[in-house]
Image (cartoon, rainbow, N blue to C red):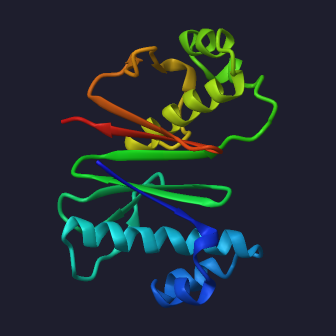
Amino acid sequence: MKLILKRIDDFDMDYLKSNISPERVRRALMFRDEKDQKRHMLGEVALRIALKEFGHRGSFNLSREQLGKPKVDVKGFHFNISHSGKYVVLAYSDTEIGVDIEMLRERRISFYRDKFHPVEIEYVDSSANKLKAFYEIWTLKESYLKAIGMGLNCELNQFYIIPTKSGEYTTSLTGLEVYQKFGPDYVISVSKLIE
């Protein structure tokens, strides 16, 4: 499992446009906000970097699965992309993978009580930093759902994934490897399915 984390501020539009497909440029320019355009284009730049690291030097076809998960026609290469604020992150692996990044920003988080499993509610409620704990759980859940290709199309409170004090994770799921990375203003969670 590998991560590629990029900041949109580190790339200018000319560079992005010249390093992605014309179709991606066309789609990106449909967004009104330049930051949204850059996030969209930077996703393909990160994908091209990942494919090179993976050893793939040829062309590829980018498509989507039934529920929207992106995929390429490169044998043994699985990836997922997420973006939030000024960041774009891509995770890739030899098995199904999902990634989520969220900027740590103040927001009303009371809605989690309807979305989280009771074990996760207890984790957030007992945390000294409830906002950070919320984002830890939210990104873990979303990364898992992206790994299985579901997005947010299921009942979030039917399973749990929580960090433990030892740095491990406790979950009601099987066949899952989880990783988290914290920056000064973001949290990234990656879920990789184990065959």
Q: What residue do we see at 24% from left, 47% from top?
A: 95
Measured as percent of width and height from the top left, residue 173 is found at 36, 21
Residue 90 position by quadrant: bottom left
Residue 76 position by quadrant: bottom left
Q: What residue do we see at 76% from left, 73% from top?
A: 33
As drawn, is 187 to the left or to the right of 90?
right
Q: Nearer the viewer, residue 87 or 145?
A: 87
Measured as percent of width and height from the top left, residue 161 is found at 46, 22
Q: What residue do we see at 58% from left, 9% from top?
A: 118
Number of numbered discs on residues: 0
Q: What residue do we see at 40% from left, 22% from top?
A: 167
**Above/below status of 83 relative to 100:** below
**Above/below status of 180 relative to 115:** below
Q: Nearer the viewer, residue 26 or 150?
A: 26
Measured as percent of width and height from the top left, residue 183 is found at 56, 44
**Above/below status of 32 relative to 115:** below
The reply to whether residue 149 is in sight is no
Q: Quadrant of the C terminus?
A: top left
**Above/below status of 101 relative to 155:** below
As drawn, is 33 to the left or to the right of 115?
right
The reply to whether residue 59 is in sight is yes
Measured as percent of width and height from the top left, residue 7 is found at 58, 64
